[in-house]
Amino acid sequence: MLRVSTENLYDRLVKRGYSEKKRNENMECEIMQVVLQEARDSYANEIVHEVPSNTIEDMESNVTRIQQWATQWKEHNKKS
């Protein structure tokens, strides 16, 4: 679950040209942790991970982490 500070989120939404209504909806969802709660309600707790996505370094680290998780999952779930 990618998480971002509301300051960064707002700036990103403005740069993408989102309408005020859409920005407000996205900001409210982040503040209220709507997507995070939906993930926790839908999946086992041990597979829902919050990772920061505030900086380029965070995003690069997330890509590496997700690649590692995918590789581990493939190895663990190989057909015999």
Image (tube, helix red, strand yellow):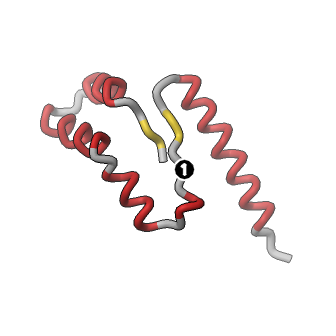
Q: Residue at x 76, y 55 (%)?
A: 72
For mark 1, does the 10 Å Cα neighbourhood hold few (<14), some (14 to 19), or many (20 or more) residues? Answer: few
For this rendering, which residue is in front, 50 or 79?
50
Q: Please state the horizontal and vertical placement of residue 9, each as a whole percent of the image.
A: 33, 30
Query: Does residue 73 sit above or below 14 in this rendering?
Result: below
Residue at 24% in and 27% down: 17
Instruction: Count numbered badges in the picture.
Output: 1
On the picture, is 27 further left or further right than 60? left
Where 40 sits versus 53, above or below?
A: below
Residue extending farthest to the right is 80
**Who is closer to the viewer here, 25 or 41?**
41
Q: Position of residue 76 (x, y in %)?
A: 78, 65
The residue beneath circle 1 is 49
Which quarter of the figure is the C terminus placed in? bottom right
Q: Residue furthest left?
A: 21
Which SS class for mark 1? loop
